[in-house]
Structures are given as structure tokens and as C-alpha cells.
């Protein structure tokens, strides 16, 4: 999974890239994507990482229809494009339904996502729920809104997934989201826990999937910029918690800058746990260790 640094170079400068006008040869989402070697490497790397995550966590087991949560941010646009590409190549035999939840944030540009999704011919549902007013009413003045806002968003997406006959909700969290969550729990929560790539919801009727678990945020940012996704910022409401999360992001970026490749190493460590060398008797039966009779 370690990515050679040279592979990360994507040429975003050339204005007159030759476009893949041959729409019959690509999914419409890639119809205007550049054909540059750098972009193709980036696209293939993301595809490879998504396929790896789907395989490692057996994400397709029992799955027929996925609701792909689309926030309007770079990550979920990238996720949808990669999944469409895999589906188009016959490598992802599930139906995809894209869903955006318009949460009533001030100045939310309502037309952007429906226009984009219609332009690439993707089945979709735009759901309006003014959770923003609920959050403002419930949270004390001066408090940050994001955690309640995200919980309400998740609940509504689960509901839409059920209404749409989907068996999974698919979200665009990536490598950095997972590492930041791990360190937040490590430093502040007193537990070793990250963000699951696959999770069965409490009701047991929907799977939550994160196929971008191995994808780097920088790659997704370059991908989004090159694909010219119509990004909608998430801070239209003027909120943004994330003091702890931002501190983790900065810490991880600092480590990566000093020692390249450490983020991938940390992610690999999360998939290589040695319970007998941790301190949790619930994970390892230390009482079963007995010396042999001499
Ligand atoms: S920035 Fe606003 S819309 Fe985005 S998660 Fe936070 S409260 Fe919700």
C-alpha cells in the first residue's frame, strides 16, 4: 500500500489537455477527464485502493444496492466517480444511488448537485431536511455544531437508504479521517479505536461502508481539482468544530513531512494488531498463559 513519492505527481497545469472525448470508452463522469499519464496513475491508484478495501473487508458480501452519501465535498465526489468507474467496468456488481442531504445550511446552492448528477446520468435522490435549525436550537450559543449535525445527517441517510431499498450506506471517509479519529481516541478518549471500514448499524439492517479507507486525502484533493468537481464547502453555516481533529491533522502532516510514508505505516499498523502485546484482558486471555510443567 505504500505509494512511491514519484507516483503522487499529477500534472494539473496543462490547460489544453486532450480530453477523453470518446465517451463510449469511459463512464460519462470521466468524459472530460485529462488523459495525462499523471492523472491516469492517480485514478488507477485510487481504483486499486478502493478495490483493495472492498476485498479486504468483504464489502460486497450480501450487497445489492448502495446509497452513496454525497456531501458536495471533494471526497464524496471522488468516491462516487471511482465507484461508477468500477461499476462501469463490471467490477462492482451493485446498484448505486447517490444521495445528498440538503440540511438547510444558509446559502446552500441547491442546484449544484442535482445538475451535476443529472449531467453524468446517475440515479440520485436529493433529500431536504432542515437539520441545521434543529442543531442551532439545541446547541447553546457559542457551541460548535458539527458533531450533532453529522449525527443527524447520518440518521437521515440511514432512513433514505431504507426508503430506497439499499442495503448499505457508503461514505467518503479516507485514510486521514481514520488516522485522525484513531489519535483523537488515543489522546483524548482513552481507547484504541479508529473509524471502521465496515460497520453493521445498531438495527442490523444496513451496512456502513468506507471504500476510501486506504486512499490519501491529498490524492483525493488532486483528483477533485483535476476532475473539476463542483465543490460545495461544508462550512456554509459558519461552524466547524474540529479543534481536536485539526490538531491531529497538523500533527500527522508534520510527521509525514519529516518522515514520508509514516501515514501509510500507521494505517498498516491498524490492520496488524497484536492483542497479547496490548493491555486489554478482554482481547487476550492472559490467564491462559501458564508455564509448562518441568
Ligand atoms: S460545518 Fe456546518 S454543515 Fe458542516 S458538519 Fe459542521 S455544522 Fe454541519
Image (cartoon, rainbow, N blue to C red):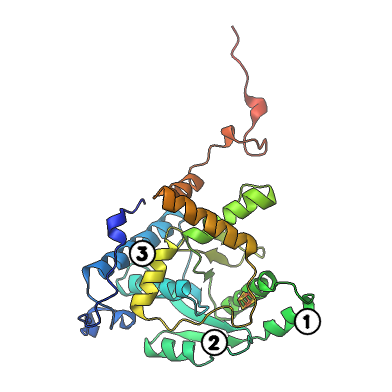
- Secondary structure, mark 3, is helix
Task: Give the percent coordinates (x, y) of residue 186.
Answer: 63, 48
Label 2 vs 3, first from the N-terminus: 3
Q: Earlier in the sequence, mark 1 or mark 2?
A: 2
| Distance (Cα) linking label 1 and label 3 | 40 Å
Residue 19: x and y in percent read 22, 82
- Foreground mark, 2 or 3, reads 3
Side (left or right) of 155 relative to 121: right
Apparent side of residue 23 relative to residue 274 in the rendered image (left or right): left
| Residue 83 sits above or below residue 287 on the image | below
Marks 2 and 3 close (CB-CB < 8 Å):
no
Residue 31, how many percent across, how many down?
Answer: 28, 83
Against 291, residue 10 (above or below) is: below
- Closest to the observer: 216 or 89? 216
Identify the element where label 2 is drawn.
Answer: strand
Does label 1 or label 3 sit earlier along the sequence? 3
Identify the residue position indicated by label 3 in the image.
46
Which residue: 64% across, 63% down?
Answer: 243
In this view of the protein, can residue 94 be seen by the observer? no
Query: In the orientation shown, which residue stands out farthest toward the top?
Result: 294
Find disc 2 in the rendering and name its residue: 126
Which label was assigned to residue 137?
Answer: 1
Q: Position of residue 228 (x, y in %)?
A: 37, 81
Q: Is residue 236 above or below residue 294?
A: below
Disc 1 versus disc 2: distance between alpha carbons? Answer: 24 Å
Amino acid at each position: 500500500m505504500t505509494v512511491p513519492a514519484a507516483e503522487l505527481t499529477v500534472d494539473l497545469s496543462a490547460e489544453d489537455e486532450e480530453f477523453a472525448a470518446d465517451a463510449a470508452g469511459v463512464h460519462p463522469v470521466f468524459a472530460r477527464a485529462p488523459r495525462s499519464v499523471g492523472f491516469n496513475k492517480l485514478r488507477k491508484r485510487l481504483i486499486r485502493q478502493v478495490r483493495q478495501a472492498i476485498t479486504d473487508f468483504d464489502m460486497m458480501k450480501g450487497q445489492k444496492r448502495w446509497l452513496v452519501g454525497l456531501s458536495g465535498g471533494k471526497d464524496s465526489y471522488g468516491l462516487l466517480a471511482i465507484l461508477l468507474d468500477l461499476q462501469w467496468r463490471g467490477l462492482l456488481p451493485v446498484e448505486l444511488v447517490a444521495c445528498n442531504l440538503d440540511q438547510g445550511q444558509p446559502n446552500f446552492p441547491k442546484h449544484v448537485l442535482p445538475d451535476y448528477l443529472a449531467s453524468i446520468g446517475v440515479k440520485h435522490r436529493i433529500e431536504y431536511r432542515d437539520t441545521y435549525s434543529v442543531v442551532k436550537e439545541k446547541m447553546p450559543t457559542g457551541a460548535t455544531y458539527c458533531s450533532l449535525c453529522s449525527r443527524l445527517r447520518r440518521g437521515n441517510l440511514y432512513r433514505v437508504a431504507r426508503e430506497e431499498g439499499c442495503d448499505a450506506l457508503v461514505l467518503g471517509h479516507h485514510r486521514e479521517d481514520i488516522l485522525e479519529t484513531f489519535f483523537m481516541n488515543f489522546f483524548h478518549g482513552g481507547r484504541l479505536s479508529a473509524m471502521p471500514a465496515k460497520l453493521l448499524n445498531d438495527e442490523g439492517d444496513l451496512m456502513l461502508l468506507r471504500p476510501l479507507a486506504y486512499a490519501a486525502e491529498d490524492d483525493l484533493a488532486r483528483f477533485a481539482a483535476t476532475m473539476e468537481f463542483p465543490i460545495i464547502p461544508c462550512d456554509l453555516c459558519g461552524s466547524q468544530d474540529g479543534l481536536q481533529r485539526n490538531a491531529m491533522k497538523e500533527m500527522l502532516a508534520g510527521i509525514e513531512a519529516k518522515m514520508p510514508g509514516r501515514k501509510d505505516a500507521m494505517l498498516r499498523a491498524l490492520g496488524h494488531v497484536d492483542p497479547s502485546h496490548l493491555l486489554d484482558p478482554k482481547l487476550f486471555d492472559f490467564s491462559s498463559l501458564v508455564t509448562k510443567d518441568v
